Structure formats: structure tokens, C-alpha cells
Amino acid sequence: MEDEVLGLNRDVYDTLITLTDAPPPAIRTWTGETWGPEDAAATLVLTHESALRVMFLPPSDLVAGEAYIFGDIDIEGDIFAALAFGTGLDDARRHPVKALKLMRRLRKLPEAPGHEAKRPARAGRKSRDQESARVNYETGNDFFASFLDPGMIYSTAYFLDSSESLELAQQRKLDIACRKVQLAPGQRLLDVGCGWGALGIHAALEYDVEVVAITLDPEQAEEARRRVKAAGVENRVSIRVQDYREVEGTFDAVTSIGMYEHVGPKELGSYFERLYELLGPRGILLNQGITTRHRKGKGKPTFISTYVFPDGELHPVEMPIKAAEEVGFQVRDVESLRPSHALTLRRWVKNLEENPLVNTDEEQVRHRLFRLYLAGSTLTFESDTGGSDVYQMVAVKPDRPWTLGRGHMIAGDDG
């Protein structure tokens, strides 16, 4: 019987590799038998006889992702190569006869009794902003420290050379953010979605400004306060657990980096309206976030929308521009950081693989979830046909005088 099941799995594998021109991974079965190229960059490990069925039925990136994070399969070696092969399978509809043959062979594989029991319920889940933040950030500061730079910056770095270190590129990003909002000594800065406080610390140290930095995560805020104190700027940087809609006061500049992806399209107007209200007459805003090139509306649940950003929704780049202008902002600069984001993601994957924090089953799921999410996102941002981008947008109150040119935005090491 086992030989028959192995044969069915081998038939499925042999069909899969005909559906794409991408180099295939090797396969190692639950019996230890290995198929495929000896020099394969990646090996797909089947942990039980039904693993391929669990992975591909029904076909979706959500189902395939769950098969990995919950241990039906493992990916050894180069995860980017394995995912590139998987991406090639998305084009299987070009070969409808082969795709039909694959489905028939998958259905011949044994079902895995009870495997759904280890997956959390996901139907109909609708989170509030705070719950969405918990899913992505409340996995523990130590976990994020295992793959982020020493400044704990969980957003796009700013690379001038692909060989640069992540730490250097992140420090440059902080400085460019301060340059773009033209900080000057004595001004007040509001940092929305402040993470672990790196931007506020940099702004206080290098630009001598007063900073109010807000996050929704209490554990994150506690670590940010520790870092603020260690930097000696606790008299100039206030870390608060607070929603941006609850902030009071007037600021010379607002930075919002990697936060507005959590603002749904219905809330974009009120989001920019509130930031507009918080700025003084000559106030300036830097808004950075990931965008989508897809303009067909929200589709079916994906792996990322279910497990990484359950309440996040990406917008086409024109939506935040339009929403900002409609509340009175003048948009004066828009810059794509897509290549830098791809490089950032690759550094994070490398760090994550080199510093795994896996001592329990729960930590194993978390590690695999982020490894898959970060590696898959890397390929999306590296592809010219990928569906995502990331933009920095500078918008100002109408009374703010123009600054001609972009010299003030350029990093000091950008020759």
C-alpha cells in the first residue's frame, strides 16, 4: 500500500514539474526517499503521505501557505527558489489538460484525517485596528530583534547600493524622513505608528526637535521607552500607546511610516483629515506605505491577509494622493522605494534564517509564517510585473512656501 501511495505522490510531482519552466525543487518523502535534481536549490519535505493533497487542494496561496506553516511540508535550502517554482505553477492554466490531470492525481492521494483541527478558524474574521496590530507585532520584541536591524526598524530601508548593510540603509531612511519634513530645532514632530521609537530618537538627537511618538502595542511602547532613555532623549521624546485619532495638539510635522496600510479605503479621508488638523498652518506630512497595482478591488482571502495583516488593505498609489488633496493637502513629492524594499526583505529573511527563535510548536509556526511572508514578498517586489510597490509621499498645508529642488531631501552620502 505504501508503495502505491509513494507512486501516486511521484506522479503528482512529475506532473507539477511539467507545468512551469522554473527549476524544480527536489522532494524528500516521509519515508526518506528523494526525487528530483541532485543539485536542486531547495528541497520540499513531505511529512506525511497526504502532504501534497493538503498543499494543493483547493488551489490557493492560503492553502499552500498553511501546509507549510503547520508542518505538512517543510522547505529546506533556498526558500526563494521554492517559491519561484510555486509562482510558476500559477500559470498552470496555460496548460488546462495538464492542470486537469494534476487535479485528478491529487484527488487520488489519501486525505489527511483531522489536519484541519490544527488550523485556526478564519471564516468571517473582522478585526479592529488594535487586534490587527497585535497579530503582526505582539509576537514579542525578541522575535523582531532576531531579524531587524539594531534600531528595530520594521519598514523599508533606503539603499544606495545593494551591497550596503541593513543597518546603514535604515539609518539613512531615518535621516531622509527627517529631511523630507524639513525638521528644524525646536519644532514638534508627531510620529504615527512609531514602532520601537527609532525615528523619534534620531529626530531628537540629530535635529533637536520635540517628538510625540504613538503606537497601539504596549509591549512595543515599553521597549521604545527603554531605547529613548538609553539614548538620553527622554525629555524630548514621548512614547504613547494611543490611536492617532485621539492625539491632541499642534505639530510642525507628521511622519506616518508603514501604518496607513491598516487604514481601509473608507477611512482614508478621515485619516488624512485628522493628520491635516494636527498640523500647524505651514505643516508638512511624510506618509510612507505599501501600495498595490491591482485596481479590481479586494479579492479572496490570501495567506498574508489572513495571517499577517488581517485588517490591512493595500490601495493603488493614486488613492492616498487623492484623499490627501481632498482634505486640503498639497502633494509635493512622491518617491517609489520598491527596489529598496526588496533589498530590505532579503536582509530580513537572511537574518531570520540565521537567528531562529524556535523552542516550541507555537514559535515554529511563527518562524515559518514570517519566513514565508517575507520571502514571498521579496519576490513580489523584485518582479517588474509584481503587484506591489512602496511610496513616500510628502504633502503640505497650502500656506507652506515652496522649497525648490530636492537637494534638501537627499542623504549626505548620496554623491
Image: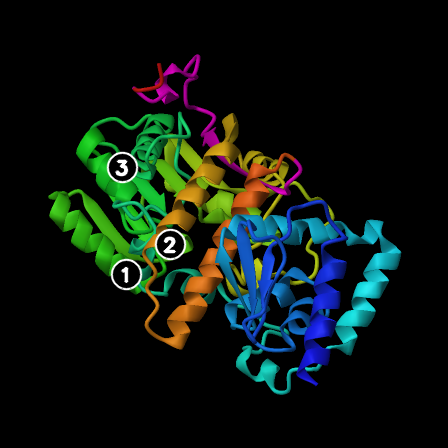
Q: Nearer the viewer, residue 169 or 357?
A: 357
The answer to whether the residues at label 2 and label 1 have Cβ atoms under 8 Å apart is no
Q: Is residue 87 visible?
A: yes
Q: Nearer the viewer, mark 2 or mark 3?
A: 2
Reply above or below: 87 against 125: above
| Residue 209 coordinates in the image, percent (x, y) | 22, 34
Amino acid on which the number 2 mark rests in the picture: Leu
Amino acid on which the number 3 mark rests in the picture: Arg
Residue positioned 29% across, 54% down in the render = 145
| Residue 318 coordinates in the image, percent (x, y) | 62, 36
Q: Which residues are magenta?
A: 385-412
Label 2 sits on residue:
352
Which class describes the residues within 10 Å of circle 2: few (<14), some (14-19), or many (20+)?
Answer: many
Label 3 sits on residue:
188
Residue positioned 32% across, 35% down in the render = 165
| Residue 133 coordinates in the image, percent (x, y) | 43, 61
The answer for how far apart the CA atoms under marks 2 and 3 are is 36 Å
The answer to whether the residues at label 3 and label 1 have Cβ atoms under 8 Å apart is no
Among numbered discs 2 and 3, the one appearing first in the sequence = 3
Q: Nearer the viewer, residue 255 or 359?
A: 359
Q: Is residue 126 visible?
A: no
Amino acid on which the number 1 mark rests in the picture: Asp
